[in-house]
């Protein structure tokens, strides 16, 4: 119950979220927690017990974001953080950063490669 009170307070103070990604924990599966998320229109993403893979892509991205950007910068304002994260994603992560899962191409390069491959086929 205290967890729900803290989340409700944060949502009212900081503004809403549209997704809430969690590791499997019993308090997050409780009826009161699910009702709280529904009240604020939040989609919960939580793996089944013992399934660590459904959030792996999101967790990998947030790890990269934290280690490559946010752990190195103290943002003075929310707008400054928003701008830096936008630039990280749209300029660096999607267009310049090489991804091993994309044959060491950026996501944009890989998408173009796959589109060309589809056109030729």
Image (cartoon, helix red, strand yellow):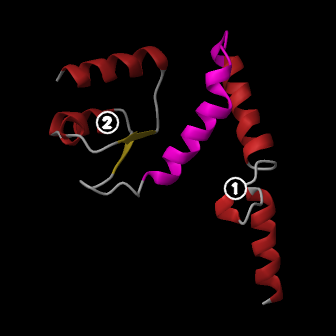
Q: Is residue 92 above or below residue 69?
A: below
Q: Does the CB distance between marks 1 and 2 fall below 8 Å?
A: no
- Horizontal relation, residue 87 to residue 39: left or right: right
Q: Quadrant of residue 73?
A: top right
- Horizontal relation, residue 3 to residue 98: left or right: left
| Residue appearing at x 49%, y 45% in the figure | 59
- Residue 63 lies in the magenta-colored region: yes
Q: Residues within 10 Å of mark 1 (few under 14, many from 20)?
A: some
Q: Residue furthest top?
A: 76
Where is residue 15 shown, x and y percent of the image? 48, 22
- Closest to the camera, between mark 1 and mark 2, is 1
| Residue appearing at x 73%, y 45% in the figure | 93
Where is residue 109 shown, x and y percent of the image? 81, 61
* Cα distance between the residues tagged 1 and 2: 33 Å
Circle 1 SS class: loop
In magenta, the rendered stretch is 55-78
Q: Residues within 10 Å of mark 2 (few under 14, many from 20)?
A: many
| Residue appearing at x 36%, y 32% in the figure | 40
| Residue appearing at x 81%, y 83% in the figure | 119
What is the magenta segment's predominant secondary structure?
A: helix
Depth check, front residue: 41 or 80: 80
Depth check, front residue: 92 or 35: 92
- Residue 51 lies in the magenta-colored region: no
Residue underneath mark 2: 37
Q: How many discs mark residues in the rendered view?
A: 2
Disc number for residue 113: none
Depth check, front residue: 97 or 86: 97
Residue underneath mark 1: 99
Where is residue 42 shown, x and y percent of the image? 39, 39
Looking at the figure, which quarter contains the N terminus?
Answer: top left
């Amino acid at each position: 119950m205290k967890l729900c009170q803290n989340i409700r307070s944060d949502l009212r103070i900081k503004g809403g979220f549209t997704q809430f990604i969690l590791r499997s924990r019993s308090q997050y599966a409780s009826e009161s927690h699910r009702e709280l998320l529904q009240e604020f229109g939040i989609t919960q993403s939580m793996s089944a017990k013992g399934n660590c893979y459904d959030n792996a892509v999101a967790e990998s991205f947030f790890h990269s974001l934290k280690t490559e950007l946010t752990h190195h910068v103290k943002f003075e304002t929310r707008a400054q953080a928003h701008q830096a994260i936008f630039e990280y994603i749209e300029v660096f992560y999607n267009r310049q950063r090489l991804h091993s899962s994309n044959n060491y191409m950026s996501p944009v390069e890989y998408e173009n490669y796959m589109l060309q491959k589809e056109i030729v086929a």
